[in-house]
Image (cartoon, rainbow, N blue to C red):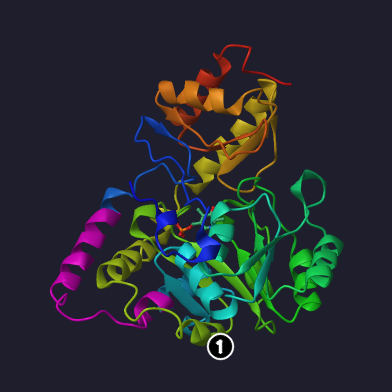
Amino acid sequence: MTSFEDLPIRDDLRGLKPYGAPQAHVRVELNVNENTHPVPPQVVMDIMGRIHTALGNINRYPDREFTNLRVALAEYLGHGLSAENIWAANGSNEVIQQLLQAFGGPGRSVLAFPPTYSMHSIIASGTGTTWIPAQRDADFEISPATAVTAIKENKPDIVFFCTPNNPTGTPVSLETIAAAYDATDGIVFVDEAYAEFAPEGEPTALTLLAGRPRLVVSRTMSKAFAFAGARLGYLAGDPAVADALRLVRLPYHLSALTQAAAEGALAHTPAMLAMVEDIRQQRDRLVTELAVLGYTPYPSSANFVLFGGVRDPQEVFEKLLAQGIIIRDIDMPNHLRVTAGTEAETTEFLNALAALDGSINGAL
Ligand SMILES: *Cc1c(COP(=O)(O)O)cnc(C)c1O
């Protein structure tokens, strides 16, 4: 059988592995930080109407500038942003890819702070951008001094932050982001995929955008908005950033159906985000109850919890999967990550975990 390594593939892609979160369809899916609540039926109805209208004109290319969608996204974000500050693509992963195509690439580098979102380094590989991992402080934090030291040592073209960070749930302070900005002439990119789950009133990096044209903040409709299947991610930044991305995006990259669906979802923002408070409660419950079971959960500002103290993560993962519950083995020794689901899903997970054999269970 031919392997991709037998093909005349780029040398820098040899030996790499693709993104590989298992996609098992089981009863309780708590592995990829989706919102496990379905979109409310009245929103589905409205989106169907909009898609019907879009289909009436589907013989034509869509609005290449997705203007109505950018207006709606700017309105949702607030913070004095307008449509010119917004760019969107098929998931924030594509936004990040476009960002690295424009500002990274061969001969350029991106500095990041693992453990962090696995796609960040995969997109760096795909775009030929050198990945520079830097150390975090204790408890996965990044102080301003830690960020500045890593930037001065490595002189990256791009700095990546993820707040709250996947897979740890740790927020990055605005002081750290502002200090990093001042320490580099490059792009500072902040992935805020989980921002809506942060505690009420926690400041977002959107508040730092004014006067910082090299700062870029991304969001997604995949998590809080319960819209992962629609594929819509976006960023806020200086209008010049969007101009740069227009050089690398494919024309008409957002289909008319995607634009219609996302506009429909945004027209019902309160209904779409109605479950966020519930999910926050289940997340906090996971932190409390995992500790009671003898594990060491980390505090989380996102919709998932990382917990340590697992003797054999792979075995726990498989025992839960055998019962129709999938969580995430993130290849961190003695750690697992679980998404906060509905109350019933969270209860099932906790009960199944509590019932596991002590030889793989419990605190180390
Ligand atoms: C889930 C996730 C995303 C979402 O990616 P999409 O392409 O928008 O679905 C982005 N960043 C982080 C850190 C994530 O965990």
Q: In this view, does 193 lie above or below 235?
A: above
Q: In which quarter of the image is the C terminus?
A: top right
Out of 109 and 149, give the one closest to the viewer: 109
Q: In this view, does 185 lie above or below 255?
A: below
Position of residue 76 in the picture relative to residue 69 (left or right): right
Position of residue 244 in the picture relative to residue 72 (left or right): right
Q: Does the residue labelled 1 lie within 8 Å of ligand 1?
A: no
Counting from the top left corner in percent of width and height, residue 352 is at 50, 19
56 in magenta: yes
- Amino acid type, callout 1: Ala
Q: Does dot 1 land on a helix, a strand or a loop?
A: helix
Q: Residues within 10 Å of mark 1 (few under 14, many from 20)?
A: few
Q: Is the magenta stretch mostly helix, strand or loop?
A: helix
Q: Residue at x 39, y 43 (%)?
A: 37
Counting from the top left corner in percent of width and height, residue 206 is at 62, 71
Out of 234 and 22, give the one closest to the viewer: 22
Part of the protein shown in magenta? 43-70
Q: Which residue is drawn at 34% across and 69% down?
A: 263
Q: Is residue 119 above or below residue 266?
A: above
Residue that badge 1 annotates: 240
Out of 15 and 349, give the one closest to the viewer: 15
Position of residue 155 in the picture relative to residue 278 (left or right): right
Position of residue 220 in the picture relative to residue 181 (left or right): left
Counting from the top left corner in percent of width and height, residue 131 is at 65, 63
Q: Which residue is drawn at 21% across and 60% down?
A: 48
